[in-house]
């Protein structure tokens, strides 16, 4: 013993710079991990198929993603200098502001608006906005131009179909044909409320009410024997300011088709021929369109079905004619599987154009399913509906691609959230972090239970260590402790061989999995997926997902993504074990397993309070250790040290701090301990030493103690007093080796 022990905190103080440096390094590591997580999430956001716009409460853009730049034609820097009114088409500004006001009031708003690209071109978006906080709004924009085009196409085909019916009805009445044709045309254009039409024929004019010729027009010639005999034209009185091309290709096609057939009608009437030939040619035009076309009467009975519609529905026109549309055109919601109200009946009841929701599936006659985009428009005669024309297209491939991108984006965001939690939470909160991850996984994959199962060290038993359950799902963790692997041998073998277990239907398990089936059914599991979790290449458990309320099919994409999650959890668990080991080694003696001097000094400083009085300190010195090392070798000396540690630990209470002070010396710190209790502990140590031997070598300890009863007394003085008393005991020539 020496003067270097007078201050028991000297070592801790000398290690302060090292500890601060270590804390600083850990902090830097956490900051780096958070930065990496943030960068990863930003990368995910940039790959989103949806345009993402973040604005302040004044409507100024403060953040945008790559898709937003692509759809608008602006660079990120340019967009950040713009606000909402700069992006929305002028005639939609009022509607856009109404959406923004509704958002501020309710926290969420959604609508379809037309917006303007940097080059002046217009396109349609579905705008879904959410109020993030009191300062920011985030808007998700999806290009719905295709859907709007279908609506326009339905109007154009409606016009042609009505024109065809007009020719069939009026036959040789050219005057009536011209009068009614000019009334049909405006309804097929993008802005029918502003459109007007005129037919000029042999010095006569047939025109809509309020027609005035303007420079914003489109025209097609009427010809007889290749000679110009008139024109048919449509014009706008006050065109939208955003339009660079006022008339789209489909509208030009309508006007050209009507002009061509009118020319034939005039020629046939002039020559006395029937109109049937012209009507047949118009029907051919309708049938040659690449999208499906179905025409019904005012009661919803089918009157026409083009070849594309035949292919998508599985019905040939001959069999479909006269049937109710719902019998041929069976549509369901892609998410719920429930029947969707048919848009044709909405058109018949309201007289307005109707489109289907994005998640609509057409179920063909043979059960084949197609995602479709659809629009239905009324056919009018003197403002009375006499039928409906519906145009639809197969968008299955596009829908699957969009769904997977959105699914993958959502998964990657979830993964970024979980990674951020693991990076920001200390390893002591591993349980909280894993439970958060399991909740995120369960909610994202819409299952009833997610959990972690770990194998015992010998691999013959398993225990459920973490669990999340959805509302209404019974927890199983308490019942799944120390379960023999024989309870599910078929699954356990696959997992131990690093294979995942995918069971879409527990009832369909093979005979060799009968034990597994019984075990799973006892937990009400209908479908499950288990992904091996590995530590240093060895399987130590698995990530499990159960579906209890309904059967669930797991795709290869699901498995691939869940393997990433399992790896993330495994890495967090392995890192925690490593950090726990480091923490243990930093505060424990490697040979005896007792607390080391660093830990003791920290605890002495922490517990040196009036509330802990009286405080006892026992110092023990192992007699004859050097002789044992010299005579029998250091391995025997190590054995005596370990035995001494065992005696000291077993002689003390659970709340006492037993430490190896260094070499052959030990210190026991005893908060809230009277002198009588300290004496009793010393007596127990003496008695145990008398009956303890290592290689026939009896244990001999010199013991000294001291008591602190006054808070004003320095604990260092108490330690010195205990040390002096230990030397007195040693000099008393107690039993030695």
Image: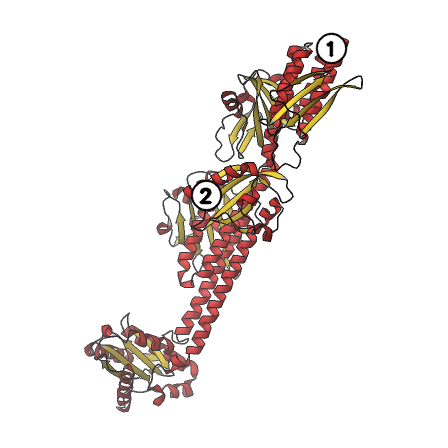
Q: Is residue 21 left or right of residue 602?
A: right
Pointer 1: residues within 10 angstroms few (<14), some, or many (20+)?
some
Residue holding disc 1: 269
Classify 10 Å Cα crowding around label 2: few (below 14), some (14-19), many (20 and above). Answer: some
Check the image and name the residue furthest to the right: 226
Looking at the rendering, in which quadrant would you find the N terminus? bottom left
Between 636 and 538, the one nearer to me in the picture? 538
Residue 165 disc label: none
Which labelled disc corresponds to residue 446? Answer: 2
The percent position of residue 132, horizontal first and vertical second, equals: 45, 49
Residue 519 position within the rendered picture, expressed as x and y whole percent measured from the top left: 41, 45
The residues tagged by marks 1 and 2 sit, at their Cα atoms, a distance apart of 67 Å
Camera-nearest label, 1 or 2 = 1
Numbered disc total: 2
Image spot of residue 427 (x, y percent): 43, 63
597 shown above or below 257? below
Q: Residue 526's image quarter?
A: top left
Q: Decide if residue 491 is in sight here.
A: yes
- Left or right of residue 608: residue 55: right
Task: Point out residue 520 in the picture as x, y percentages from the top left corner.
Answer: 42, 44
């Amino acid at each position: 013993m020496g003067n270097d022990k007078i201050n028991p905190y000297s070592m801790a103080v000398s290690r302060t710079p090292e500890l601060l440096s270590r804390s600083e390094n850990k902090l830097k590591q956490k900051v780096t991990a958070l930065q990496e997580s943030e960068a990863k999430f930003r990368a995910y956001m940039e790959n989103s198929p949806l345009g993402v716009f973040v604005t302040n409460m004044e409507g100024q853009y403060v953040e945008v993603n790559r898709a937003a730049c692509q759809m608008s034609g602006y660079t990120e820097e340019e967009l950040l200098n713009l606000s909402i009114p700069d992006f929305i088409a002028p005639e939609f500004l009022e509607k856009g502001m109404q959406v923004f006001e509704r958002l501020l009031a309710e926290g969420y708003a959604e609508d379809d608006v037309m917006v303007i690209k940097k080059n002046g071109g217009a396109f349609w978006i579905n705008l879904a906005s959410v109020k993030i906080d009191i300062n920011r709004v985030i808007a998700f924009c999806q290009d719905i131009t295709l859907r709007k085009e279908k609506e326009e196409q339905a109007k154009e085909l409606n016009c042609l179909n009505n024109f065809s019916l007009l020719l069939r009805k009026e036959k040789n009445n050219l005057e009536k044909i011209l009068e009614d044709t000019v009334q049909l045309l405006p309804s097929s254009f993008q802005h029918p409320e502003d459109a007007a039409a005129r037919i000029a024929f042999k010095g006569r004019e047939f025109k809509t009410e309020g027609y005035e010729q303007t420079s914003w027009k489109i025209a097609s010639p009427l010809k007889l024997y290749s000679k110009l005999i008139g024109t048919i034209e449509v014009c706008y009185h006050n065109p939208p300011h955003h339009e660079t091309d006022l008339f789209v290709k489909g509208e030009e096609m309508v006007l050209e088709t009507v002009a061509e057939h009118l020319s034939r009608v005039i020629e046939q009437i002039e020559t006395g021929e029937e109109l049937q030939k012209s009507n047949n040619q118009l029907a051919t035009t309708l049938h040659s369109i690449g999208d499906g076309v179905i025409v019904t009467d005012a009661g919803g009975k089918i009157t026409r079905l083009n070849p594309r519609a035949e292919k998508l529905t599985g019905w040939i026109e001959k069999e479909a004619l006269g049937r109710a549309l719902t019998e041929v055109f069976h549509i369901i919601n892609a998410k719920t599987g429930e029947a969707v109200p048919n848009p044709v009946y909405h058109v018949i009841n309201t007289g307005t154009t109707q489109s289907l929701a994005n998640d609509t599936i057409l179920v063909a006659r043979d059960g084949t399913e197609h995602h479709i985009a659809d629009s239905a428009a009324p056919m009018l005669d003197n403002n009375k509906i006499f039928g409906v024309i519906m145009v639809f297209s197969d968008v299955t491939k596009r829908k699957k691609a969009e769904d997977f991108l959105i699914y993958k984006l959502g998964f990657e965001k979830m993964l970024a959230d979980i990674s951020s939690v693991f990076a920001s939470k200390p390893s002591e909160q591993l349980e909280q972090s894993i439970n958060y991850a399991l909740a995120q996984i369960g909610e994202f994959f819409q299952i009833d239970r997610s959990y972690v199962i770990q194998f015992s060290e010998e691999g013959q038993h398993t225990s459920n260590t973490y669990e999340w359950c959805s509302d209404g799902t019974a927890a199983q963790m308490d019942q799944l402790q120390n379960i023999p692997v024989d309870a599910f041998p078929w699954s356990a073998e696959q997992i131990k061989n690093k294979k995942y277990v995918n069971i879409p239907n527990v009832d369909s398990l093979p005979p060799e999995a009968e034990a597994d089936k019984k075990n799973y059914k006892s937990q009400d599991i209908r479908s499950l997926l288990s992904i091996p979790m590995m530590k240093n290449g060895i399987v130590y458990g698995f990530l499990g997902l159960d579906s209890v309320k309904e059967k669930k099919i797991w795709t290869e994409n699901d498995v691939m993504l869940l393997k990433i999650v399992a790896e993330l959890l495994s890495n967090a668990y392995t890192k925690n074990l490593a950090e726990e080991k480091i923490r243990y080694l930093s505060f424990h003696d490697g040979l005896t397993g007792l607390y080391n001097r660093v830990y003791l000094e920290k605890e002495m400083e922490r517990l040196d309070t009036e509330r802990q009085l009286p405080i006892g300190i026992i110092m023990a010195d192992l007699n004859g250790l050097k002789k044992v090392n010299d005579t029998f070798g250091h391995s025997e000396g190590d054995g005596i040290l370990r035995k001494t540690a065992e005696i000291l630990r077993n002689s003390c209470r659970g709340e006492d701090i037993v430490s190896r002070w260094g070499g052959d010396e030990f210190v026991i710190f005893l908060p809230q301990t009277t002198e009588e209790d300290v004496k009793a502990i010393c007596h127990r140590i003496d008695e145990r030493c008398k009956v303890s031997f290592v290689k026939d070598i009896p244990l001999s300890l010199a013991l000294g103690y001291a008591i602190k009863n006054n808070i004003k007394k320095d604990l260092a003085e108490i330690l010195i007093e205990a040390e002096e008393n230990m030397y007195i005991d040693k000099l008393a020539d107690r039993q030695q080796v």
